[in-house]
Image: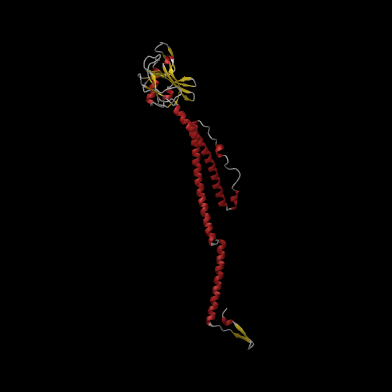
């Protein structure tokens, strides 16, 4: 509305007179109106934006939350990859390590015990659906991973302990040649060179000259060192696990040898000869398992080449005569 349409009451004349405003006042008046309208419009705009987009701090918080959820989803994927690696370790544990050592496998039920069940993460329901879902997934997978790692850790501790014992047992097995010479007679029925009859040859004979060193074929304890009838000078070693090895027809014993002495695989225990009932210098070698003689060749496969082992088998099957 313009000032030309405005009138003021004049008390002196008791009538209305036309209002007159200076130009400066009119300018101030109009500017005030525009400023007031601008302030009102700005306030309405800010209020509208706050309602639909949020305040600047709320916008920043929403962006931060979105990034945190993205990071959590990424962590959940990494945890899933670690779960697969633990599953692979469990497979190696069951099919390789525990199998070789003769340990009972850990059942899948035991490995998964404590995983799942009641929703112990319901406290996350106070958050948005997306945040609640990813928080539950991350925490559940973490709990599962932690439990399975504890089971695997205990299993590896058991495997290491068993391996230490297994390594000790391996060192005790009589698996090397007792002397450097070639096999000349095998295990089984053979013609005896002295008695001239067919009889059981409960060991194998190795070619050896008098004085050639004779080695302990595995870690063990000397349980006999002395004269033993037709075997002449004779040594017997207890390797544990009901396994014993025997060495016969020796010319002499190693000077420090005595009953009860601990020996290591490869230690010299005596020297080859032809004492007792023998057709000539050689080493007669036996292995006994649980009191019963067995073919020593089955223990020698580790120490000789495949070609040499095949030659041993050929000699053992083709030579009908023993040296003792």
Q: Indicate whether 50 appears above or below 7.
A: above
The residue positioned farthest toward the front in the image shown: 256
The residue positioned farthest toward the top in the image shown: 196
Image point (49%, 43%), residue name: 82
Which color mode does the image show? Answer: secondary structure
Image point (55%, 47%), residue name: 139
Can residue 171 be seen? Answer: yes
Q: Indicate whether 224 appears above or below 26.
A: above
Pick the front one: 256 or 185 = 256
Question: Would residue 254 be found to the left or right of residue 115 on screen?
Answer: left
Q: Position of residue 21 (x, y in %)?
A: 56, 83
Pick the front one: 267 or 278 = 267
Pick the front one: 25 or 142 = 142
Image point (53%, 45%), residue name: 142
Q: Position of residue 128 (x, y in %)?
A: 57, 53
Q: Position of residue 118 (x, y in %)?
A: 61, 44
The N terminus, quarter of image: bottom right
Image point (54%, 80%), residue name: 26
Question: Would residue 232 be found to the left or right of residue 134 on screen?
Answer: left
Q: Indicate whether 53 appears above or below 123.
A: below
Q: Quadrant of residue 209?
A: top left
């Amino acid at each position: 509305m313009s000032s030309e349409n405005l009138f003021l009451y004049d008390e002196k004349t008791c009538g209305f007179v036309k209002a007159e405003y200076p130009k400066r006042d009119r300018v101030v008046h109009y500017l005030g109106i525009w400023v007031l309208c601008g302030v009102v419009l700005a306030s309405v705009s800010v209020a509208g934006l706050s309602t639909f987009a949020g305040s600047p701090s709320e916008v920043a918080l929403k962006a931060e939350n979105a990034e945190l959820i993205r990071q959590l989803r990424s962590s959940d994927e990494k945890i899933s990859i670690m779960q697969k690696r633990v599953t692979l370790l469990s497979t190696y544990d069951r099919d390789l390590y525990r199998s070789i050592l003769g340990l009972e496998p850990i059942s899948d039920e035991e490995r998964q015990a404590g995983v799942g069940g009641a929703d112990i993460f319901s406290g996350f329901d106070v958050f948005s659906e997306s945040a609640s879902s990813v928080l539950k997934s991350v925490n559940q997978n973490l709990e599962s991973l932690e439990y399975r790692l504890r089971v695997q850790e205990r299993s590896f501790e058991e495997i290491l302990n068993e391996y230490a014992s297994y390594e000790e047992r391996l060192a005790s097995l009589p698996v090397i040649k007792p002397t450097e010479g070639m096999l000349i007679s095998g295990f089984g029925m053979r013609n005896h060179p002295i008695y001239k009859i067919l009889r059981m040859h409960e060991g194998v004979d190795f070619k050896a000259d008098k004085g050639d060193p004779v080695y302990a074929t595995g870690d063990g304890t000397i349980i006999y060192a002395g004269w033993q009838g037709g075997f002449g000078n004779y040594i017997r070693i207890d390797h544990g696990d009901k396994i014993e090895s025997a060495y016969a027809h020796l010319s002499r014993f190693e000077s420090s040898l005595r009953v009860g002495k601990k020996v290591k695989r490869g230690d010299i225990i005596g020297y080859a000869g032809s004492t007792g009932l023998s057709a000539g210098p050689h080493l007669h070698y036996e292995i006994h398992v649980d009191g019963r003689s067995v073919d020593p060749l089955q223990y020698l496969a580790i120490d000789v080449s495949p070609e040499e082992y095949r030659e041993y088998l050929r000699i053992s099957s083709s030579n009908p005569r023993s040296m003792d």
